[in-house]
Amino acid sequence: VCVRRELCAFPVNIPSSCLPTEVLWITIPSNCLRNTHNFHIIATYVRGEDAPQQTDICNLLNLLQTKLPDSTSPTYNSDNYLYLGDFNLPYVEWDEGCPTIYSRNSSAATREHVTKLLHLLTLNGFSQHNYNKNHCGNVLDLVFSTFNLELSICQYPLIIKDEAHPPLNIDASEIIVPPFVTENIDRCVFRRGNYDNINKHLSEINWEKEFLTRNTEEAVNFLYANLYNCINLYVPLHKTHKGGRIYPVWYSKSLIKIIHEKDKYHKLWKKFGNNRDYNEFAVLRDRFHRVHKACYSKYLFNSQQSIIENPKTFWTFAKSRRGGSGCPNELTLNNTSLRGGSQIADGNNTFFHSIFSFPASEYPSVILPDPQNTSNDSISCPHIVEETVLIMLKKLDIK
């Protein structure tokens, strides 16, 4: 077995009780695969004669019972296993379903040990993937794994082809999980902006002069250019994940990681129906409930302690419990309940009309610049045609 040096593979010690059975066990650490589980490669050779074969199968059965983790344990943490080799079981026929064991050229004791071995592998989530028969119509080379893989006949083997053992290509790239890279974006923290400098910066601009010397498009661009300039100069930035916060504020990083792992194994179980995936999902689900309860209790305790010194913390807690920021279904104005969009809109109109201050009838005269240096366009009197409005309305997103 050849492994790249960067994968830091190491052999697992095989007990002397397994001799003379030929077994090679290689483990690749999870951190070298960008995964959360180790990868075990087990290669074996089972002798073809009945008596030695019975000994080899019995030794393999004891080895797997000792080395494989207990799937019923609460601390069960599944790894990825690839178990393959020359098993020399011509009396076992493999189809796309369960294997069929025949009595030809084998003793009852040997068949019993083979049945126990196959049951043990199935119980631990192993599946057999090789159904390619040799020139005699047998499948001697078996490939078991606890994950999904792609298997095909190798067209260009490195050694001379053996008709009894067709060369195989095994693609196990599914276990290599690339790191989930979230796109970080800069968001403005407006509550920490320096609004004194912003007001000073904007008040130093002669807006009347600047607007009168520009057409409508140029005036709007000038306005936004100065606003964005103030934001860039006086509003700090904060790096955050694209899409914003999707979890409550009391969710810790470990709890979010548990959620991602739980969802991953739930999807695998739904897709492949593997009991190992469901066991892993059940363990993570129980862990999620325990960690979620602990995180919320800690956040609630810290909020209660902070309210004593800063009462505004209560509103931070209230906003974190709010399910959404949508418009309410009902408002109250002067002891009158307003329901529906039209009533709420009319109520807002009535309220703002009651507090609106009408402008004075006269304004002090303003010295305007030379008309020759001004534009014919005016922001107060823009020229809008019906076709332009229709085009813009069609571009609106009705969703």
Image (cartoon, helix red, strand yellow):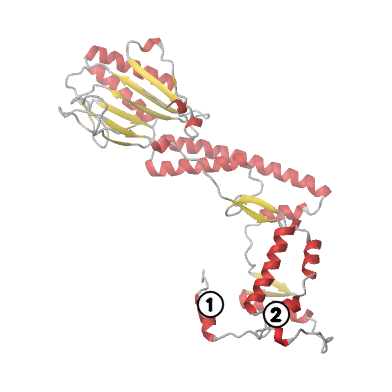
- In the picture as drawn, the residue positioned furthest to the front comes out as 372
Q: Nearer the viewer, residue 267 or 109?
A: 267
Amino acid type of the residue that numbered disc 2 sits on in the rendered structure: Thr
Amino acid of disc 1: Met
Residue 190 showing in the rendered view: no
Q: Position of residue 138 (x, y in %)?
A: 19, 28
Q: Is residue 387 above or below residue 177?
A: below
Q: Is residue 371 visible?
A: yes
Secondary structure type for disc 1: helix
Q: Quadrant of residue 87?
A: top left
SS for dot 2: loop
Residue 165 screen position, x and y as percent: 22, 26
Closer to the eye: label 2 or 1? 2
Q: Is residue 173 left or right of residue 371?
A: left
Tell me the crowding category of disc 1: few under 14, some 14 to 19, or many 20 or more residues within 10 angstroms, Cα based.
few
Q: Residues within 10 Å of mark 2 (few under 14, many from 20)?
A: many
Q: Which mark is residue 24?
A: none
What count of labels does the image hold? 2
User: Compared to 373, does 194 lie above or below?
Assistant: above
Observer-nearest of 327 and 149? 149
Query: Which quadrant of the figure contains the N terminus?
Result: top left
| Residue 218 against residue 372 in the figure, above or below | above
Residue located 58% across and 53% down the image: 242
Asked whether 298 or 392 is in front, the reply is: 392
Of the residues under marks 2 and 1, which one precedes in the sequence? 2
- Residue 145's quadrant in the figure? top left
Residue at the disc numbered 2? 213
Please provide percent x and percent y for residue 110: 25, 17
Q: Which residue is mark 1?
A: 392
Q: Quadrant of residue 352?
A: bottom right
- Cα–Cα span, label 2 and label 1: 27 Å
